[in-house]
Image (cartoon, grey):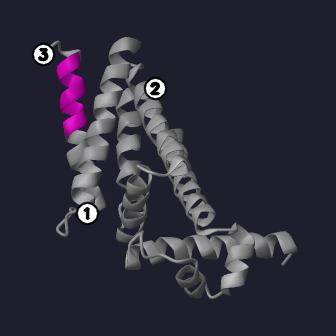
């Protein structure tokens, strides 16, 4: 394996270990030492690749955003109608990868970190903008842009609200059930607007 390949592999191991460490210890109790042990590398090597805990956490959040973005692109690639595109966005938001306990723990930690951390706040803004943009694009296929923008914001609120509500619930539904709930609520919202109710 090339030097670049080894570096990429090590960085990936450290990011995966960060997600696991957040899930097991909580955001505040995560240390670079715990992350390094989880990745099977030395503290020094972890520090060499990321420089600080903050940089490692930022890289982990970027990884989560990249993974989510890739899922969006795959799901949206075959969606042609407005309904199919909305469905793709919802299904991605509640996919088995995004709605599993370790990923949920990491996302919730970053939501909390965004209150005081400008980097986390900026990355969460990217997420929110991407979600609204994908929904708005889908909705402009069947209505005027002004109305689509408003409904996209409301639909994003439904997705995020249900996601957080269930993320904090020990008896949360399966990813498929969660997506069904969100899709039902968004359909009612959109269809009510389209019918003039």
Residue 4 vs 197, above or below: the answer is below
Horizontally, residue 136 falls left or right of residue 155, namely right
Q: Name the residue under label 3.
A: 197
Horizontally, residue 4 falls left or right of residue 131, namely right
Horizontally, residue 170 falls left or right of residue 156, namely left
Q: Tell me where residue 105 appears, x and y as whole percent.
A: 37, 66
Q: How far apart are marks 2 and 3 (CA)?
A: 22 Å
Q: Which mark is residue 137?
A: 2
Q: What stretch is highlighted in magenta?
A: 185-193
Asked if disc 1 and disc 3 are in contact, CB closer than 8 Å, the reply is no
Residue 177 visible? The answer is: no
In the image shown, does 24 or 178 lie closer to the viewer? 24
Residue 167 visible? The answer is: yes
Residue 2 vs 118, above or below: the answer is below
* Sequence order check, earlier mark of 2 and 1: 2
Q: Tell me where residue 129 appears, x and y as whole percent.
A: 47, 35
Residue 148 vs 58, above or below: the answer is above
Label 3 Cα crowd, 10 Å radius (few <14 / some 14-19 / many 20+): few
Q: Which residue is drawn at 56% across and 49% down?
A: 119
Q: Name the residue under label 1.
A: 174
Q: Tell me where residue 173 appears, x and y as whole percent.
A: 21, 62
Quadrant of the image for the C terminus?
top left
Q: How far apart are marks 1 and 3 (CA)?
A: 32 Å
Quadrant of the image for the N terminus?
bottom right
In the image shown, does 181 or 133 lie closer to the viewer? 133
């Amino acid at each position: 394996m090339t030097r670049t390949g080894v570096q990429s592999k090590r960085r990936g191991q450290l990011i995966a270990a960060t997600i696991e460490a957040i899930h097991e210890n909580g955001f505040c109790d995560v240390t670079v030492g715990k992350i390094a042990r989880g990745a099977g590398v030395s503290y020094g090597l972890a520090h060499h690749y990321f420089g600080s805990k903050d940089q490692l956490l930022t890289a982990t959040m970027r990884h989560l955003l990249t993974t989510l973005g890739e899922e969006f692109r795959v799901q949206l690639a075959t969606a042609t109608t407005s309904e199919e595109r909305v469905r793709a966005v919802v299904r991605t938001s509640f996919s088995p990868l995004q709605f599993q306990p370790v990923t949920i723990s990491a996302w919730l930690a970053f939501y909390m970190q965004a209150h005081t951390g400008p980097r986390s706040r900026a990355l969460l803004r990217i997420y929110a903008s991407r979600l609204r943009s994908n929904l708005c694009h889908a909705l402009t296929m069947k209505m005027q842009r002004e109305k689509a923008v408003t409904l996209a914001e409301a639909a994003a609120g439904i997705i995020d609200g249900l996601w957080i509500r269930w993320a904090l619930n020990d008896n949360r539904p399966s990813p498929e059930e969660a997506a069904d709930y969100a899709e039902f609520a968004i359909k009612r919202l959109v269809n009510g607007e389209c019918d003039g109710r």
